[in-house]
Amino acid sequence: MFLYAFIFPIISIIAIIWFIERYIHNKNSLSTVILWSVFWVFVSLFAIFPEFSNSFARLFGITRGLDFIIILVFVILFYTVLKLYFLVDQMQNNLNKIVKEVALNNEITLDDEEE
Amino acid sequence: MEHKITAEDKSSTYVVLPAYNEATRIQPVIEEIARKGYNMVIVNDGSSDNTLDVIKASKKKYPDQIHIFSLMINRGVGVATQAGFEAVLRYNPKYIVSMDSDGQHSADDLDNVIRPLVTGEAKAVIGVRPLKDMPRSRNYANAIMNLMTRIFYRVDVSDSQTGFRAITADALDKISINARGYLISSEFIREINDNEIPFAEVPIKTIYTPETQAKGTNVKVAFQILLQMIRHQF
């Protein structure tokens, strides 16, 4: 058995515990916990039983398990980047609202200078 | 005969000037507008130079005509103009103009730009820059943006990226501007079209200097606007 067959399940357990803990403290939604838990369970399965990735890949019409894992990683990264993009966009909008509000409530007069 | 713009028309017009790092250029722009009898709402867009001090110095000369607001951090010409449009409604204007504060636009064109609003011929006006005066890179970018504005916003205009525009107060109340950056030009056109606000195109002079050319719609900015236009479709 290769070293990664031990390392990846350990990382997966830590990751799942971390997501559950964040859910308990209301920092994650339940769907996020489920999604990431499924992901890490599959990572562990692929690490312990490499041939499992082959049979799983064939389900999607991909011949090699490794190719399937690479494609899966790309999909997850793309999803994460997109999610971050929308999050940043929303934050930019909120920031703009605050900055505008502060400016509009504080018209600059010449009296400000004299104070 | 051309309708003459009266002092009353001018006093009920407010010019919105978004300003970002314009310390070396904005003073003659402000004072020329003030000398012509127009009012102004100037929005300092979080400038890192002393733009705000320069604006304040001009306000000392024309205290009643100049209103200053300052964004604490730089948020882009779109946000600064939005803030200007929101602020200006406090002063009960009849007509609102927005123009660049870098000296690219001439205050001499203000009368021409508000004339269709005063006569009732239109409720919104866009100042169209002469293509022959435009630097080549700007010309290409502008042609692309005009085409994109036609495709994505279904409006055909001669200059979709002009920063010189005018609108009546009641028409401004109907439109909603959310763009952060230079997309505001196309968004303004889309909004007046979507709200069926009658608009006119008025030719304006443009003064290009190396400094003014560094700002505005070049190919890179055009690409960013294109991405935002695509995003706005969803």
Image (cartoon, coloured by chain):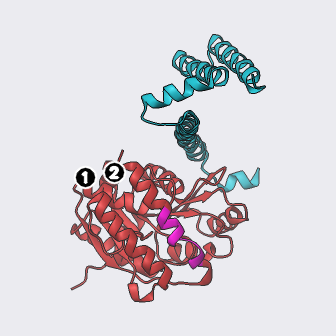
Chain colours: A cyan, B red
Q: Secondary structure at mark 1?
A: loop
- Distance between mark 1 and mark 2 Cα atoms: 7 Å
Residue at horizontal 21%, vertical 86%? B1
Name the mark on residue B195: 1
Q: How would you classify the magenta stretch by its main secondary structure?
A: helix
Which image quadrant for residue B116?
bottom left
Residue placed at 22% from the left, 62% from the top? B198
Mark 1 or mark 2: which comes first in sequence? 2
Q: Residue furthest top?
A: A24
Tell me if residue B216 can be seen.
yes
Looking at the image, do the residues carrying marks 1 and 2 touch, with CB atoms under 8 Å apart? yes
Q: Nearer the viewer, residue B112 or B137?
A: B137
Indicate the quadrant where residue B101 lies. Answer: bottom right
Give the amino acid type for the residue marked by disc 1 in the picture.
Asn
Local secondary structure at mark 2: loop
Magenta segment: B212-223
A87 in relation to B51, above or below: above
* Vertical arrangement, residue A107 with respect to residue B149, above or below: above
Q: Nearer the viewer, residue B147 or B161?
A: B147
User: What amino acid is found at the position of numbered circle 2 in the picture?
Assistant: Ile
Residue B93 position in % (x across, y down): 39, 57
Label 1 CA crowd tier, 10 Å (few <14, some 14–19, many 20+): few
Image mark count: 2
Looking at the image, residue B53 sits to the left or right of residue A66; the answer is: right
Q: Provide residue A87's location: percent of width, then percent of height.
A: 55, 37
- Observer able to see residue B96: no
Q: Residues within 10 Å of mark 2 (few under 14, many from 20)?
A: some
Residue B214 at x, y percent in the picture: 60, 75
> Depth check: B232 or B34 in front?
B232
